[in-house]
């Protein structure tokens, strides 16, 4: 049993609320590939449980960490986000799962290796797909503001996969 200051665990790196107290993003618990540490992963999973997270959504291409969520008694979903094929069906399944989880009042953490363009694009796409924001440009701007950096082309491409591009003005 963990005692002392570590009993509450440690917050995952780059943890950011998308929707306060219900939906957050971060880098992969334990850190990304070369910096991944098993002990840190355990501490971050403890923190997620202590903070009341009910569900983890992994966008990793591999099943890394899934066994650790089972051990940490966290429900998880895995939506491997493809880079070489059309991600439409994966995103639709992910968005439906996320919408349903939030509607049930669950606290959800979404991650990939790092909190980068692809996670930002998935989040912005979800905000439009779910009707929380009306346009792709507004969602991109909101996510950039939340994360504190600009979204690159890989993220912007994901925003339009399910929502379509912004309509062009005649002129």
Image (spheres, rainbow, N blue to C red):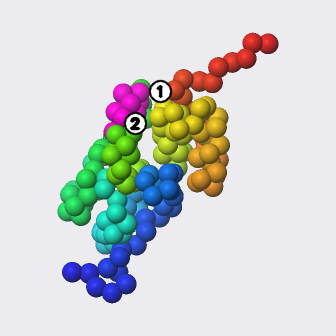
Outermost front residue: 104
Within 10 Å of the Cα at label 2, are there few (<14), some (14-19), or many (20+) other Cα atoms?
many
Left or right of 31 in this view: 1: left
* Disc 1 target residue: 162
Residue drawn at point x = 37 percent, y = 61 percent: 29
Q: What's the CA distance linking mark 2 and mark 1?
A: 10 Å
Within 10 Å of the Cα at label 1, are there few (<14), some (14-19), or many (20+) other Cα atoms?
some
Residue 36 visible, this orientation = no
Left or right of 45 in this view: 84: right
Q: Are marks 2 and 1 in contact (CB under 8 Å)?
A: yes
* Disc 2 target residue: 95
The quadrant holding residue 107 is bottom left
The rendered magenta stretch, by its main secondary structure, is classed as: helix
What span is colored magenta in the figure?
87-97
**73 shown above or below 57:** below
The quadrant holding residue 27 is bottom left
């Amino acid at each position: 049993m963990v005692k002392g200051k570590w009993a509450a665990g440690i917050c995952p790196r780059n943890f950011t609320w998308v929707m306060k107290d219900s939906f957050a993003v971060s880098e992969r618990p334990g850190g990304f590939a070369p910096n991944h540490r098993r002990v840190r992963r355990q501490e971050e999973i403890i923190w997620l449980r202590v903070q009341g997270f009910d569900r983890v959504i992994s966008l990793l291409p591999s099943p890394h960490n899934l066994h650790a969520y089972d051990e940490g008694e966290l429900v998880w979903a895995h939506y491997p986000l493809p880079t070489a094929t059309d991600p439409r069906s994966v995103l639709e399944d992910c968005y439906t799962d996320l919408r349903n989880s939030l509607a049930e009042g669950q606290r959800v953490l979404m991650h990939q290796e790092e909190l980068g363009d692809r996670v930002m694009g998935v989040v912005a796409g979800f905000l439009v797909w779910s009707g929380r924001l009306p346009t792709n440009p507004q969602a991109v701007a909101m996510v950039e503001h939340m994360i504190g950096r600009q979204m690159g082309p890989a993220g912007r491409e994901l925003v339009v996969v399910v929502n379509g591009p912004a309509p062009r003005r005649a002129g």
